Amino acid sequence: MNLPPQVTERAFARLAEINDGADDPQALRVAVEGGGCSGFQYDIRLDAQADDDLVLEGKGQRVLVDPVSLPFLEGAVIDFADELIGARFVIENPNAASSCGCGTSFSI
């Protein structure tokens, strides 16, 4: 049984801030693509929902994961970090054997 990714309350809260006052609130898409310095990289962006997306909901917000990316994100945690180096959505991925220093690419 595959465990879907989890989204923290902090990530949903930040997405709610982004969508606050928007006429057409967007969902946050988290995808995995080939590339980056470690072999795979995360693509995190606002996007429209596709028919085959896994939809994770909280605080009236949606996070989308496409079926191709889902196995790479099994058991992952999608969070939001506001640190000295910047504020960003981050992925804590138990499937990643290693990752680059910036946290946007990883290997399995």
Image: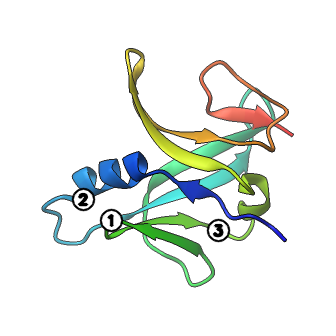
Q: Nearer the viewer, mark 3 or mark 1?
A: 1
Q: CA distance from mark 3 to mark 2?
A: 21 Å
Mark 2 closeness class: few <14, some 14–19, many ≥20 residues within 10 Å: some
Q: Residue 52 at what x, y percent from top left? A: 63, 81
The residue shown at (60%, 48%) is: 77
Give the structural element (helix, strand or loop) at label 2. Answer: helix
Q: CA distance from mark 3 to mark 1?
A: 21 Å
Q: Which residue is mark 2?
A: 19
Res. 59 mark: 1
Give the structural element (helix, strand or loop) at label 3. Answer: loop
Instruction: Say what amino acid the circle numbered 1 marks.
Output: Lys
Q: Residue 94 at what x, y percent from top left? A: 76, 42
The residue shown at (24%, 72%) is: 24
The residue shown at (60%, 41%) is: 91
Position of 19 compared to 21: left or right? right
Position of 64 compared to 1: left or right? left
| First of labels 3, 2 by sequence position | 2
Give the structural element (helix, strand or loop) at label 1. Answer: loop
Q: Dividing the picture into quarters, in which one does residue 86 lie? A: top left
| First of labels 2, 1 by sequence position | 2
Res. 66 mark: 3
